[in-house]
Image: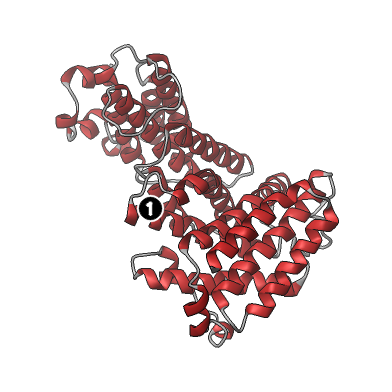
């Protein structure tokens, strides 16, 4: 019964975008009221309602955003919160913590990367309880209800994140929004739970995946922007995105979108002098681009269970390879600039992916841009005559992979 109620709530909030501002505000107030009334009866139920209520706050503020009203005005670098009601901001934080504990802790220690580092809020210890009689009569909150609520929230916070990102890039400062940490928590929790659910269950065509995959893809990009904008420590987000890119259910067009988005993030960061952070985004871009190429090749040779949306021709694969080589060359230069010692791993993996495509289609362009960039980097590193012996030679790097490369392919790369 409780999950049928959430379906009703989801229907209502989903259709509120077609009504006027006052009606949206009324719906938000009703949801906050329901949340407060149910808090002592069932914290998980109340928290899902809290997520929907907060989402409606963002929906209303996005209306201001669309009408050109500034939401990032600030004086003396004092942040202005998008959720400027501190009570609502606390409900946002509490709801996320309750649902994280309720769902992630029940899924075992491998469920979430966030579980390993999340700090339990002591103020919630007495509140995060659920009435047994309530569960017996109305049932427990389902995973679908949980992920639907977070998905709705993330869908409507994305525009806010993108606006905050543009402001950060333009002003060359970090995020000035005081509630951005809570927003980051929401996106991370959504991505983390979503990926775990489908890594464990492998339900490639389940209802949850069908309803949330578009939001999930866009949420991953938004989460990366926040992660890179907030701090230097973003390994958890990188790990989550790598898991997303390697999922069996992901489609070529989704990989293409992700790669393009990561490249844009990397270039934007590089242009404002954030070279190290730009390197993170561009490395993700490289891995995603070549995963896209490999998937297209598998589809072309009928070795993939994924169905391609459109007409998969040789030209599509050629364009993907050309794009991958060009952007990988740019990435190599940036990665080298920030002193990454794993540069040779990136170039070798890229060339191995190119060679696999060449074995399928001999008419593809050679990886000249990529190889030339590697040679240019080698020249920079060998300006000191005494350092020549320490410069990695491409042949020596590839020779250890000879079992994966034909002699003909190796010759083309080294020409």
Is 397 in front, or is 359? Answer: 359
Residue 195 placement, left or right of 33: left
User: Relative to residue 412, is residue 271 depicted above or below?
Assistant: below
Please tell me whether mark 1 sits on a helix, a strand or a loop. Answer: helix
Q: Residue at x 72, y 71 (%)?
A: 32
Residue at image location 50% in from the left, 84% down from the top: 133
Report x, y in % for residue 334. Answer: 49, 38
Q: Residue 203 in the image: state x and y as whole percent.
A: 36, 49
Q: Is residue 227 visible?
A: yes
Q: Which residue is mark 1?
A: 198
Q: Residue at x 78, y 57 (%)?
A: 24
- The image quarter in which residue 394 lies: top left
- Neighbourhood count class around disc 1 (C-alpha, 10 Å): few under 14, some 14–19, many 20 upward: some
Which image quadrant: the C terminus?
top left
Q: Position of residue 73 (x, y in %)?
A: 82, 56
Q: Is residue 74 left or right of residue 368?
A: right
Quadrant in the picture for residue 264: top right
Q: Is residue 77 visible?
A: no
Q: Is residue 310 shown left or right of residue 363?
A: right
């Amino acid at each position: 019964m409780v999950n049928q109620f959430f379906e009703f709530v989801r229907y209502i909030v989903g259709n509120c975008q077609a009504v006027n501002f006052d009606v949206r505000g009324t719906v938000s107030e009703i949801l906050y009221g329901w949340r407060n009334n149910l808090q002592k009866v069932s914290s998980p139920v109340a928290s899902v309602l809290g997520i929907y209520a907060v989402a409606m706050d963002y929906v209303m503020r996005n209306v201001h955003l669309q009408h050109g009203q500034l939401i990032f005005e600030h004086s003396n670098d004092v942040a202005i919160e998008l959720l400027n009601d501190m009570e609502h901001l606390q409900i946002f934080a509490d709801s996320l913590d309750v649902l994280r504990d309720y769902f992630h802790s029940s899924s075992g220690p491998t469920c979430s990367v966030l579980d390993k580092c999340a700090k339990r809020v002591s103020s919630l210890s007495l509140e995060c309880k659920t009435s047994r009689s309530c569960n017996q009569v109305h049932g427990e909150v389902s995973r679908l209800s949980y992920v639907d609520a977070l998905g709705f929230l993330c869908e409507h916070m994305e525009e806010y994140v993108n606006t905050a990102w543009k402001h950060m890039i333009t002003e060359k400062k970090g995020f000035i929004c005081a509630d951005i940490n809570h927003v980051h928590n929401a996106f991370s929790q959504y991505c983390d739970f979503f990926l775990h659910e489908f890594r464990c269950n492998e339900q490639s065509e389940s209802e949850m995946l069908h309803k949330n995959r578009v939001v999930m893809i866009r949420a991953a990009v938004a989460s990366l922007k926040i992660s890179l904008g907030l701090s230097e420590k973003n390994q958890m987000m990188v790990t989550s995105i790598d898991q997303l890119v390697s999922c069996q259910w992901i489609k070529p067009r989704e990989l293409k979108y992700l790669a393009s988005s990561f490249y844009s993030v990397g270039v934007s960061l590089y242009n404002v002098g954030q070279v190290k952070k730009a390197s993170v985004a561009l490395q993700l871009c490289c891995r995603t681009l070549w995963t896209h190429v490999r998937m297209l090749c598998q589809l072309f040779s009928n070795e993939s269970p994924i169905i391609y949306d459109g007409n998969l021709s040789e030209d599509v694969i050629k364009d993907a390879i050309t794009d991958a080589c060009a952007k990988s060359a740019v990435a190599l230069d940036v990665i080298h600039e920030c002193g990454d010692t794993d540069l040779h791993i990136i170039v070798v993996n890229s060339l191995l992916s190119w060679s696999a495509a060449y074995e399928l289609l001999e008419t593809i362009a050679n990886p000249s841009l990529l190889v030339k960039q590697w040679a240019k980097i080698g020249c920079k590193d060998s300006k000191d005559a005494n350092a020549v012996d320490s410069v990695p030679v491409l042949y020596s790097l590839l020779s250890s992979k000879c079992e994966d490369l034909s002699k003909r392919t190796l010759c083309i790369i080294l020409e």
